[in-house]
Image: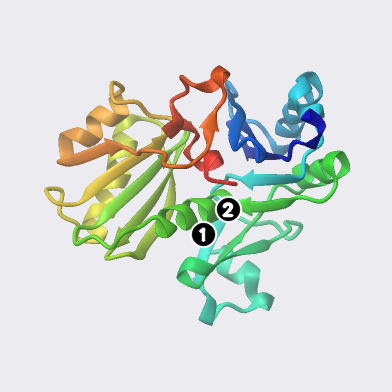
Amino acid sequence: MKQNNIKELSIQVNLNGLSFCILNRTSNTIEFLNHIAFKNKLTPFDALNRLKTELSSNTVFSDEFDAVTVIHQNELSTLVPKDLYDENHKADYLKFNAKILKTDYITHDEIVVNDGVNIYIPYVNINNYIFETFGEFVYKHSSTLLIDTVLQNKKTKDAPEIYINVNTSTIEVLVVNKGQLQLFNAFEYHSKEDFIYYILFVFEQLKLDAETAKIYLSGNIEKDDELYGVVYTYIRHVEIITVDFSYKLSEAIKNEKLHRHFLILNSF
């Protein structure tokens, strides 16, 4: 019976675009997967309007969902070891990494896999709207999801591994060495020169070897584009990440390039 299907919805919010994914738990199938890129970076207000338009205009979102997750993707986050974290100093940790206003709402995710706390500013207007529309839901920062996914799936390797999630104008860089998180940071780029500059900067800071370290790329990148090309010019081992999960894909999305949806596909 169709109405007995257990369905979960994930929504990824970035000021450069929105992503949506629906998992049917009953049939273990990803039924819907879509990314909408904005021409320009929007304000949180305009991003909300685009989200409202999308949710109201597509009938797939009128289903009953047993769980809803919102992923906030922005540069307004910082990691703190759990032992050093003090709830009363959220703003103090964050102000070194991001411009924050007195009115900003600051929250945190716990990252159990490495005893970390991720402090960040969510899009409160988006959260309020999702609550009005769907009721109770879970939200987290994209970097929480990225770190958790990579560390949960890690076999301890001798050579350092660098995971780079590529967005329209930012990259999220995560370095794992011997199974431990060595670095996480986000950088803004506007050209392929910026792009490789930050990657080589990370290599230099951590004294990584371009001959032995491995780079795994996810997100808005393809093997035949200039960003991949410039990385491959400087680093010997570069590959597009393989998205590894047990879900089936519906016919409509069989041909999707899954590495482009790496974050949202790992949100269930």
Residue drawn 40% across the image and 55% down it: 153
User: Which residue of the protein is positioned furthest toward the bottom in this rendering?
Assistant: 83
Q: Which residue is mark 1?
A: 97
In space, the residues marked 2 and 1 are separated at their CA atoms by 7 Å
| Residue farthest along the left direction in this orientation | 211
- Assign a secondary structure to mark 1: loop
Q: Along the line of sight, which residue is nearer the eye, 11 or 97? A: 11
The part of the image, by quadrant, that contains residue 109 is bottom right
Please give the residue where the numbered disc 2 appears in the rendered image: 76
On the image, which quarter does residue 204 sit in? bottom left
Under mark 2, the amino acid is Leu
Asked if residue 18 shows in the view, the reply is no
Label located before the other in sequence (2 or 1):
2
* The one of 65 and 17 positioned closer to us in this rendering: 65
Residue drawn at (60%, 24%) of the image: 38
Quadrant showing the N terminus? top right
Q: Is residue 229 above or below residue 146?
A: above
Mark 2 nearby-residue class (10 Å; few <14, some 14–19, many ≥20): some
Relative depth, front residue between 102 and 130: 130
Query: What is the x, y in percent for residue 116?
Result: 51, 70
Confirm or deny contact between disc 2 and disc 1 (CB under 8 A): yes
* Farthest residue, direction right: 132
Q: What number is the disc on residue 209?
A: none
Spot occupied by residue 10 in the image (x, y as percentages of width and height): 66, 40
Task: Find residue 51 and report its horizontal and vertical position in percent.
Answer: 73, 30
In the displayed structure image, the side of residue 25 where residue 173 appears, left or right: left
Q: Residue at x 88, y 42 (%)?
A: 132
Give above or below for 76 relative to 125. Answer: below
